[in-house]
Image (cartoon, rainbow, N blue to C red):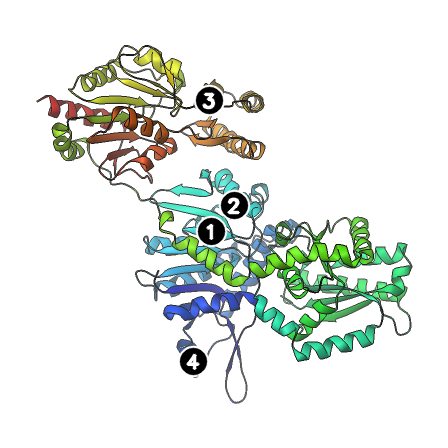
Amino acid sequence: MGRVILVSNRLPVTIEGGSSGQRVNRSSGGLVSGLDPLHQQGDGLWIGYPGASPDISTRVLLKEMRLEPVDIPASEYSGFYDGFSNSAIWPLFHYLLEYCNFDPAAFKAYKRVNKRFADAVLAHAEEGDTIWVHDYQLMLVPSMLREKLPGARIGFFLHSPFPASEVMRVMPQREEILRGLLGADLIGVHTYEYADHLAQSFRRILGLESRQGVVNLSGHSVRIEAHPLGIDVENQRAAAFSKEADRILTQYKRTLGDVQVILGVDRLDYTKGIPNKLEAFKSLLDREPRWREGAVMIQVAVPTREAIGSYRDQKSEVERLVGEINGLYGKRGKTPVQYIYNSVSPAELGALYRLADIAFVSPIRDGLNLVAKEYVACRDDGGGVLVLSEFAGAASELGEALRVNPWDIEGTAAQLERALDMGFGERNERMAPMHRRVVANDVHRWVDRFMRSLGNPENEVRATPPMLSSSVLAETLAGPFVSAKSPLIMLDYDGSLREFTPRYEDAAPTEEIHKLLNDLGALEGTEVFINSGRDHHTLGEWFGDDDISLIAEHGSWVKYKGKTKWQRLGPRPDVSWKREVRSILKEYVARTQGARIEEKSSALVWHYREAEDDVGEWQSLDLTTHLENTLASAPVEILTGSKIVEIRQLGLDKGHAYDIVESERGPFDFVLVTGDDRTDEDLFARLGPDAFSVHVGQGGSLASSSLSSPASVRRLLALLVEARSG
């Protein structure tokens, strides 16, 4: 891997002006600490908005630091950042639709600024560079880069949640946003839930199938992976146990006296649920007088996005609740809520983590939440309790925390009381494993994992094989085929050898196909197979008299030519899942006119070729999502093909069947296989480098070449028969 180009909304510096000129200060934070080594190695470059217009000397300094500023007019940046990023994407991704404003003018600014970022990358990118784009402000950049750099290696990481598809559908610009992400090779999110939501949106909004976290496009594959962000453990602990932190901790203890401390540290953002936290603390004091003297809540609220009205409203609401609680339960020398509306230094934050008996982290929706991890990292003394919202991404990693639903005020108050009453033994049992986990999975490991996955040669993009004419491809194949002593020709049927028909059962082979297969089968030494997803009864009826061999149901059954009986490939499968799936498919048949169910020995198929296009496609997407949720632990895989959704036994595929044929009937000195859909990729992936593979139709494939249609395949086979017969 060559140089790394990092792309983020802001550069990792702040530019401050003064009478003596501008100063450039390095930004702090775990993400910057994690990405900085990547930036420093191999002459890496970091591209972003500088926050202020740099003067000439500052530009020179930034260049020396390998930081490239993106120049954006202030009015345009406001529409991009405040107008669309934080008034449309941010609230939508946090399920707060009441704050959403999908202003078309703001979206135009968003697109223009994304293009400015893409142009800045294109001005510096070189062959072999790896480009890593960050966060929701730049979701269009990957596709803009892919258009100009089709061979580039591009990663994208989303640092916010990604919502469920039914929420994503609310956004008028949903398709453009999703297509923007599809320029990446790897999309990283914090949790498997967000990865699943993104895959569902690609399927339900764009109609793109995702299989095992991979979306296959024409000439390109996009992987979706969960990579939860870690913290900079070393720097966090260094600040928390510094002499300055010791001094601050002593001062707090002297001021507060003998009370238990509940700590909240949040940006003053409506997603953080600070009013809900205060309501829960008030509920605790209302019903349990002993905590009016025995507990105090310190709430740090870091100012953010103060230009946006909803954030100013949030500040007013928080201040009102703080005043109400302190007015009700404050006494001389005793303030129940210590409210800090300001940023705090790393040393003071570390001191607060060490001071707090309870960390109260209860966002109403949060992509991850690093405060929870920072608190855990600083508490290796066996004390401390983490009270954590189930809607924070970090909840999937910190399972020993006391979980709360921040909308359940009384339930949250009860968990706070449980935390306050918890003994040291249980606190240690809960905190110790979380501490080990956070320390082991720090920000540096996060960077390493993501970059390893992005650079993994096993994850190379799937190219579009060259589209050839039948005659040109025949010229390439004729020589090796004619000279071969034991050639193998393995043909997919529907969509490959035979055109699709409106009714699935009407796709019986024509006289042309029967003659062609028998002519091939009569060639000396030539093994000819139909390798189809069709059930073995149908294939037997259609081809039982032809001089060829048959593989049915994606490798479940085989019937060799000259034989009358079918042979099962592998052990008898466990199909106990069929009953539940059959009932689901019947429900979708009832709601989709023209749909029907096909039953195979090891699979069930929902066909919708006769349904209206829009209705069938929509119901198939909904059905696939339903099945994936229902069958998450079942030994099956769900495939979508041309007007079908198929649920089949795991481990049975066309590639597996090919391996058996090769071992039982081979070795072969010439191999030609054809196929048109996802199920044939299993076969293409099994082939050796000397085999010839043909993908039928447009799109990305592992095949070595493409033909445009089944008619082209038949023409190719006829030319090969002619060549070997002559």
Identify the residue position indicated by label 3 in the image.
Answer: 602
Q: 10 Å neighbourhood of mark 2: few (<14), some, or many (≥20)?
A: many
Which element is circle 2 on? helix
Sequence-first tag of 4 and 1: 4
What amino acid is found at the position of numbered circle 3 in the picture?
Answer: Ser
Q: Nearer the viewer, residue 578 or 567?
A: 567
* Mark-to-mark CA distance, 1 and 2: 10 Å
Q: 10 Å neighbourhood of mark 3: few (<14), some, or many (≥20)?
A: many
Instruction: Point out residue 364 in the picture as x, y percentages from the top left corner.
Output: 68, 53
Sequence-first tag of 2 and 3: 2
Sequence-first tag of 3 and 4: 4
Instruction: Point out residue 161 in the picture as x, y percentages from the top left corner.
Output: 58, 52
Residue located farthest toward the front when viewing the structure as drawn:
425
Residue located farthest toward the bottom when viewing the structure as drawn:
20
Query: Contact, CB < 8 Å: mark 4 with mark 1?
Result: no
Q: Nearer the viewer, residue 522 or 393?
A: 522
Which element is circle 4 on? helix
Q: Residue at x 32, y 60 (%)?
A: 128
Vertical side of 627 occupied by 598: above or below = above
The C terminus sits in image quarter: top left
Q: In this rendering, which labeled residue sits more in front, label 1 or label 3?
A: 3
Residue 276, can we see it? no
What amino acid is found at the position of numbered circle 2 in the picture?
Answer: Leu
Vertical side of 479 occupied by 502: above or below = above
